[in-house]
Image (cartoon, rainbow, N blue to C red):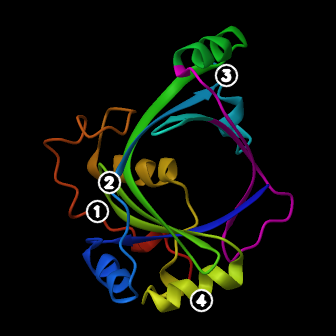
């Protein structure tokens, strides 16, 4: 499967939620996600642009992503393989036995809406609020326009790369992206505009 997506950083999701409401769409309740990122001790996966992730929300999913040889410059594109597993703890033990270790934990709240062949994800992370659009490039470009999200402001980085930006800007000394880690931090001054694709 080829995953094609873009992100938009917002001060608040309220405007997007209002626009969806005017379309007659009520986003479902927020779903809490806990993600564990695995890598080899020498960081081989990150170094080669791969991601191995174990996600827990209402399901448990193991996901592997790898770069496409000729990805579009219009959106972030990755090759994605994903499967459901029944036990996160046991899956983590299997990965450990294979030489992988947890290198980062990150959390978010997500609401997902499916509209016109696009997955619209309303995401709240410890360091900001984002809209993620996933689908074919013409569809997500059209959806961005419908939602008044300027295409020139799209972000092609994943949340781990965005955290690296936040970490540098705020001088953070921790690796995990949890709400507890950010509980007493003010991230309102972090600007993601320099990361957008013009």
Q: Residue at x 40, y 33 (%)?
A: 175
- Going from N to C along the chain, the mark reached first, 1 or 4, is 4
Q: Which mark is residue 169?
A: 2
Q: Circles 2 and 1: CB distance less than 8 Å?
A: yes
Q: Closer to us: mark 2 or mark 1? A: 1
Q: Circles 1 and 4: CB distance less than 8 Å?
A: no
The residue that disc 4 covers is 142
Q: Which mark is residue 40?
A: 3
- The residue lying furthest to the right in this view is 69
Q: Circles 3 and 1: CB distance less than 8 Å?
A: no
Q: Residue at x 33, y 54 (%)?
A: 30
Q: Residue at x 29, y 48 (%)?
A: 126
Q: Circle 2 — which element?
A: helix
Task: Report crowding for label 3: few under 14, some 14 to 19, many 20 or more residues within 10 A (C-alpha).
Answer: some
Q: Nearer the viewer, residue 4 or 184?
A: 4
| Image quadrant containing the C terminus | bottom right
Q: Circle 3 — which element?
A: loop
């Amino acid at each position: 499967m080829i995953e094609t997506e873009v992100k938009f950083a917002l001060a608040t999701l309220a405007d997007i939620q209002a626009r969806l409401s005017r379309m007659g769409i009520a986003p479902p309740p927020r779903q809490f996600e806990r993600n564990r990122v695995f890598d080899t001790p020498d960081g081989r996966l990150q170094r080669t642009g791969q991601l191995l992730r174990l996600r827990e929300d209402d399901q448990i999913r193991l996901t592997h992503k790898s770069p496409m040889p000729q990805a579009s410059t219009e959106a972030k594109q990755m090759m994605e393989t994903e499967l459901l597993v029944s036990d996160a703890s046991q899956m983590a033990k299997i990965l450990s036995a294979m030489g992988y270790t947890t290198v980062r934990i990150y959390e978010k709240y997500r609401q997902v809406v499916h509209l016109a062949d696009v997955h619209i994800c309303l995401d709240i992370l410890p360091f900001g609020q984002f809209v993620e659009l996933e689908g074919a490039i013409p569809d997500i470009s059209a959806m961005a326009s419908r939602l008044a999200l300027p295409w020139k402001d799209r972000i092609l980085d994943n949340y781990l790369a965005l955290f690296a930006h936040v970490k540098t800007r705020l001088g953070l000394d921790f690796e995990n992206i949890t709400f507890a880690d950010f509980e007493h931090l003010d991230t309102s001054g972090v600007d993601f505009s320099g990361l957008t694709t013009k």
